[in-house]
Image (spheres, rainbow, N blue to C red):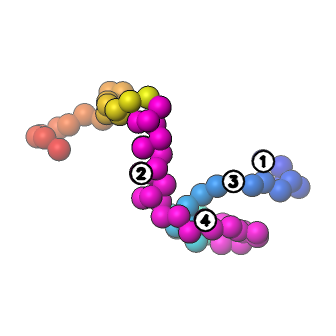
């Protein structure tokens, strides 16, 4: 990243508030909140995907393995 440039990005309010150690984001200028809950954004995304592509079928890529019983 170029320290002489200004970058715009999207994040959630938790991270913007310094959550998970991203305290540098608390210095953000021109922060804008849609006041949309993250859970509502995820629900809307899932509804959109289902309306375009049909039901979502969960799958794994093999990186996670159940050891010692069911989840």
The residue wearing badge 1 is 1
* Circle nearer the viewer, 4 or 3: 4
Q: Cβ–Cβ below 8 Å for labels 4 and 1?
A: no
* Circle nearer the viewer, 4 or 1: 4
Relative to 6, 48 lies left or right = left
21 or 46, nearer to the observer: 46
* Circle nearer the viewer, 1 or 3: 3
Q: Cβ–Cβ below 8 Å for labels 4 and 3?
A: no
The residue wearing badge 2 is 43
Quick check: can you spot residue 58?
Answer: yes
Mark nearer the N terminus (4 vs 3): 3
Which numbered circle lies on residue 68?
A: none
Gap between marks 4 and 3, in whole Å?
14 Å
The residue wearing badge 4 is 34
22 or 16, nearer to the observer: 16
Gap between marks 1 and 3, in whole Å?
13 Å
Percent coordinates x, y for residue 39 in the rendering: 42, 58
Q: Residues within 10 Å of mark 1 (few under 14, many from 20)?
A: few
Gap between marks 4 and 2, in whole Å?
16 Å
Mark nearer the N terminus (3 vs 2): 3
The residue wearing badge 3 is 9
* Circle nearer the viewer, 2 or 1: 2
The quarter of the picture where the C terminus appears is top left
Mark nearer the N terminus (2 vs 1): 1
Q: Is residue 31 above or below residue 47?
A: below
């Amino acid at each position: 990243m170029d320290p002489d440039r200004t970058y715009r990005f999207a994040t959630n309010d938790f991270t913007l508030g310094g959550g998970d150690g991203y305290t540098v984001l608390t210095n953000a200028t021109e922060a804008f909140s849609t006041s949309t809950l993250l859970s509502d954004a995820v629900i809307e995304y899932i509804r959109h995907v289902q309306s375009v592509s049909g039901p979502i079928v969960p799958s794994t890529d093999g990186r996670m393995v159940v050891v010692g019983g069911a989840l």
